[in-house]
Amino acid sequence: MSISRGLAALTLFFATTLSASYLYKDEVVFLDSVTKEINTIGKELHEKTGINLYSMILKKTPKDKNLTEYEKEILQDLEKPAVVLMLSQEEKEVDIVVSDIALEKLFDKPQILNPTLNTGSILPILRGKSKDESEAENVGRAIKSAYRDLASQIAKSKATHLQSAPELVNYLYKDEVIFLEYVNTEVNAIGRELHEKSGIGLYVAVLKELPHGMSIVDYEKEAIAKLPKPAIVLVVSEFDKQIDILARPQSLYALFDKDQVLSPMPNSGTILPILTMKAKHTPMSQKFGAAIQNGYTDLAEQIARSKDIALETVPGNANKEVFLVLRILFYAMILYALYLYIKRKYLLRKMKNERP
């Protein structure tokens, strides 16, 4: 009995050691969910590309070394080819080092390490720690985000696909009109954070026109059937001039005000007022891009508030400023139209009175 127990313990030890190989060092997080996700993605990436992607989470960098020196030292002990994502908690310092300079062509290092919201994969999360998160949970979320982003970029450069990388979900579900990278980046950044914190997938489809013989409701139902639940889908069709939001399960409608989001009035709606604005020199792609950014952000913020969570990736006051300008233009147009009406009435009356 004691021998079998000893063998079982030894087997477990080796299994754990082997499965933890891609989370090379962890001095902060110690969360099974983080370890499991990193090793699952790392294993699939290595199987499909031959590249080893390691992550290291330090409490702080050793006193006698800077981060770059420490990375080079660690690289000597790792299986090549290797890419190492390193985070030092106390210094809030992150870096990516490679065993071969050619590996740097497989991913966008400045983007991943960018401190700007909607662009960087790690620093915005570290700097935007929510009150309800522990330090371990925040660092864990940040390292998972960067690791997923890095793994996906390497896989894409190698013309392969990772089933285990959650960030491959595209929240800009379909785009036949906009094709603007900054819109895609913002929608996916907000969508990822909303899903991470609430479990809800918020998707958007921008169509040139609806498939022949299909209503917008039929299209929504077909689209949402392919998506993991719970899910909300915003669909806009340019030629059909139709827009709608579908949620499944239906209980999700309680999390946002559908009528307000889809309202054509500038003082309430966040999509149609932009789409119906007359702007001669603005390309249709930019007009739809602005409308989708505003509507998607509005929806995401309403869902987040209903779930009592904060989204760090939303553009802040940018949308409010857009809405304010729209309201001013709307009321200015009403006043101008009223002025023209009164002026016309006055001139007609004056002309009538001047007749012999």
Image (spheres, rainbow, N blue to C red):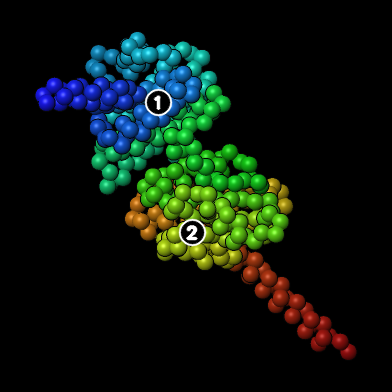
User: Which residue does the numbered mark 1 point to in the structure image?
Assistant: 43
> Helix, strand or loop at disc 1?
helix
Would residue 120 be seen by someone viewing this image from the given angle?
A: no
User: Which residue does the numbered mark 2 point to in the structure image?
Assistant: 247
Q: In terms of depth relative to the viewer, which is nearer, 112 or 265?
A: 112
Sequence-first disc among 1 and 2: 1
Residue drawn at x 65%, y 46% as measured from the top left: 176
Disc 2 residue crowd, few under 14, some 14–19, many 20+, Cα 10 Å: some
Q: Amino acid at mark 2?
A: Ala
Q: In terms of depth relative to the viewer, which is nearer, 110 or 154?
A: 154
Q: Amino acid at mark 1?
A: Lys
Looking at the figure, which quarter contains the N terminus?
top left
Q: Is residue 197 rendered to the left or right of residue 1?
A: right
Residue drawn at x 31%, y 31% as measured from the top left: 35
**Looking at the picture, how far across and down is residue 38, in whole percent?**
36, 30
Q: Is residue 271 above or below residue 46?
A: below
Residue drawn at x 65%, y 66% as measured from the top left: 333
Q: Is residue 229 above or below residue 35?
A: below
